[in-house]
């Protein structure tokens, strides 16, 4: 089996991303037409991590996004359950073990995070919540490791808000996205899974309700790129 299925068994998903790790950032940049860089900036602005704060970047992959949370003086930890992704990230950060010079890399499953209660000022997860076997359990785990009053920021693929463009986008997802991934030497089967998992993911209001049901409050969202992705933010009750 070369790709995960939509039941998202953790071993299948992790193995799929292990195989994709080397070209992951390049292919993401290409298939998003460079929009992924703007999305990262929007997430960093929503996290708004200041001096002395500690941020958990969950599903961090190679850690490309993690450095953006430290620019205002915060500390950040990159965590993922794909060891292939983490190893690639460590190499790119100049490390020779599971830690880079400025960002620690920690192997962790979103359903059983290897951190204590109330450790982080903010927890964020970008285009990775969709790959978790149990969304509600993952959101509850994120709440557990967040300090009272702390914040959650989620970037995830969502539902396009412009009807005509939605038809074009779905065609791109199902037909062209795997072809582009193959051209750039990535695991094209994994991008078939990506397209299917995006199409299967709930819309913005439904995800907001799921976040609230997991114990977060003041949940709101902002659409980016006509709703191709959305940034959801919530707060742990103080």
Image (cartoon, helix red, strand yellow):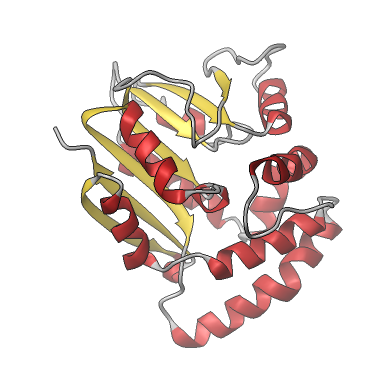
Whether residue 42 is visible to the viewer of this picture, yes or no, is no
The one nearer the camera, 179 or 37, is 179
Residue 57 drawn at (x, y percent): 47, 32
Residue 22 drawn at (x, y percent): 78, 38
Residue 23 occupies which quadrant of the picture? top right
Q: Is residue 237 left or right of residue 211?
A: left
Task: State the residue at coordinates (74%, 75%).
Answer: 175
Q: Is residue 182 above or below residue 61?
A: below
Q: Is residue 56 above or below residue 14?
A: above
Whether residue 150 is visible to the viewer of this picture, yes or no, is yes
Residue 213 drawn at (x, y percent): 28, 52
- How many marks are shown on the rendered structure? 0
Residue lying furthest left in this view?
Answer: 238
Residue 134 drawn at (x, y percent): 49, 48
Task: State the residue at coordinates (84%, 52%).
Answer: 1
Residue 237 occupies which quadrant of the picture? top left
Task: State the residue at coordinates (62%, 32%).
Answer: 81
The one nearer the camera, 170 or 209, is 209
Q: Is residue 55 left or right of residue 3?
A: left
Task: State the residue at coordinates (35%, 39%).
Answer: 140
Q: Is residue 2 above or below residue 105?
A: below
Image quarter in which the C terminus is found: top left
């Amino acid at each position: 089996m070369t790709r995960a299925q939509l039941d998202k068994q953790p071993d299948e998903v992790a193995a799929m991303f292990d195989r994709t790790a080397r070209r992951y950032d390049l292919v993401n940049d290409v298939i998003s037409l460079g929009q992924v860089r703007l999305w990262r900036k929007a997430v960093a602005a929503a996290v708004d991590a200041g001096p002395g704060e500690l941020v958990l970047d969950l599903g961090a992959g190679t850690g490309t996004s993690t450095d953006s949370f430290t620019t205002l003086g915060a500390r950040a930890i990159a965590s993922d359950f794909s060891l292939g992704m983490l190893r690639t990230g460590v190499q790119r950060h100049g490390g020779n073990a599971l830690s880079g010079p400025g960002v620690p890399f920690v192997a962790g499953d979103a359903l059983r995070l290897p951190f204590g209660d109330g450790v982080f000022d903010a927890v964020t997860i970008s285009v990775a919540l969709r790959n978790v076997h149990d969304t509600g359990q993952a959101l509850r785990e994120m709440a557990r490791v967040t300090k009272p009053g702390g914040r959650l920021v989620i970037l995830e693929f969502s539902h396009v808000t412009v009807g005509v463009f939605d038809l074009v986008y779905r065609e791109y997802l199902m037909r062209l996205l795997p072809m582009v991934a193959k051209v750039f030497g990535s695991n094209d089967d994994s991008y078939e899974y990506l397209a299917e998992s995006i199409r299967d993911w709930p819309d913005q209001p439904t995800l907001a309700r799921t976040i609230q049901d997991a114990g977060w409050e003041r949940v709101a969202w902002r659409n980016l790129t006509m709703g191709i992705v959305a940034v959801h933010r919530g707060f742990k009750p103080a």
